[in-house]
Image (tube, rainbow, N blue to C red):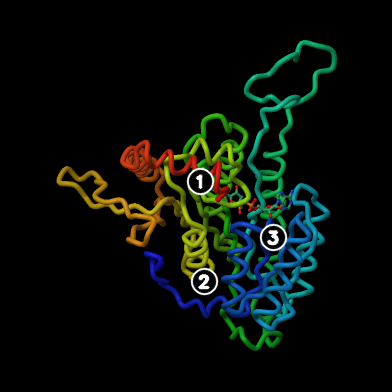
Amino acid sequence: MATPETPKVDLDHLKGKTILITGGASGFGAAFARKWASHGANIIIGDMSDAAGESLVAELRSSTGSQNHCYQHCDVTDWQSQVALFKLAVKQSPSGHIDAVVPNAGISGDTNSSPGNFEDPQGLDGDDPAPPRLKILDVNLTGVMYTVHLAMFWLAKNNTEKAQGKNENQPEGTRDRHILLIGSVASLTPLVGAAQYTASKHAVTGLFRSLRGTAFHRGIRINLLCPHFVKTGLLSDGVMLILAGGGLGEVSDVVEAGTQFMADKTAYGRSVVIGPKLKVEDGDDGEMRLVEIPSAEGEEGKGIWDCFAHDYQSTEAFFYRYTRLLIAFAKMRGWAGWAKDVFNVVFRRK
Ligand SMILES: NC(=O)c1ccc[n+]([C@@H]2O[C@H](COP(=O)([O-])OP(=O)(O)OC[C@H]3O[C@@H](n4cnc5c(N)ncnc54)[C@H](O)[C@@H]3O)[C@@H](O)[C@H]2O)c1
């Protein structure tokens, strides 16, 4: 099926870039890696899922004929592990520099089970009560902060003079410095029952909003993707059941949005939300109006929506309307849509 948004920038700009992706062994990270490697980027992946990471790099080396792609075991919650990953990327890079970093590693899941029952604390008046488990914050926030901190150091070293002559694919004056943050709809709106995940992804928005006021001083571009729910390893069957009837975003749209930001050197301080494909038009009253829901069979809708992150008043107004559209979408699919999604989760595992 054709994607609704055709590329607006020349993807040849990806050629010769060295891009470090945490959590790149599966899901969005792996999809980014495949896309960007196919356009000539060198991909460095750090993940804890070694078999998947090594297999992906073998695939990239074989499909592109380049040995520059690399995998290294990395636990993003471990500072030294990330330090080593960045050093590997610099060593492996044909230019000797890193052009872009994607702090993508993230987890969701059950943080409310004992002993870390965060939203329903029990027994804290006993002797030596255990602290809540904050694993999601460790990975999605501390891990991201470590990655961004290292990126701010290593990207700033990516200057033209030093890189000059080391990479013939990269003419003088074109080297890029880019951090592509991975947020979520939970960066912009609460996910009820997922307080820790919401807190971690709201924090990513705070990081984005803060850094885009300063990162340009170091010549670093910063952009943010906020995917709605998309079927990857992150979503358990339980979450899929809760989402039944509501529709999902598509990995291909997340990749397209990330690729536009990665290849477009003028994209700075931008954020998009990526969700189920919708088709809307302006109503007479100036409100966005849902006119048609595309079928899964191929009718085109739009899955990537600019959320005008340069103006968060607009964003919140936008999100209010977008959420209403999603609710209308779920209502329109009705019980039949819900039943179909539940059937798929329970019987087809897709
Ligand atoms: N799938 C969705 O619906 C969705 C929606 C919004 C945002 N996101 C975000 O997208 C990002 C990628 O998630 P995904 O959907 O591709 O999920 P995924 O589970 O397919 O990929 C996440 C990757 O991170 C790795 N990882 C987990 N903990 C790690 C650690 N401590 N150190 C290094 N790597 C680690 C995993 O091994 C995995 O390869 C996450 O930040 C997630 O929060 C996902």
Image height of 21 relative to 291, above or below: below
Q: Residue tagged by mark 1? A: 344
| Residue 155 point in image, percent of width and height | 66, 66
Indicate which label's residue lies in the foreground, 1 or 3. 1
Label located before the other in sequence (3 or 2) = 3
Is the shortest distance between ligand 1 and the CB of mark 3 under 8 Å? yes
Inspect the image, locate mark 2, and give the three-letter code of the amino acid beneath it.
Ala
Label located before the other in sequence (1 or 2) = 2
- Residue 313 visible here: no
Inspect the image, locate mark 3, and give the three-letter code of the amino acid beneath it.
Ala
Q: Residue furthest front?
A: 347
Quarter of the image with the N terminus is bottom left
Label located before the other in sequence (1 or 3) = 3
Inspect the image, locate mark 1, and give the three-letter code of the amino acid beneath it.
Asn
Image height of 271 relative to 341, above or below: below
Q: Nearer the viewer, residue 145 or 130?
A: 130
Q: Which structural element holds mark 2?
A: helix
Tell me the distance, in whole angstroms, between the alpha carbons under discs 1 and 2.
36 Å
Indicate which label's residue lies in the foreground, 1 or 2. 1
Residue lying at 68% horizontally and 49% vertically, measured from the top left: 145
- As drawn, is 332 to the left or to the right of 149? left
The numbered mark at residue 25 is 3
Tell me the distance, in whole angstroms, between the alpha carbons under discs 1 and 3.
25 Å
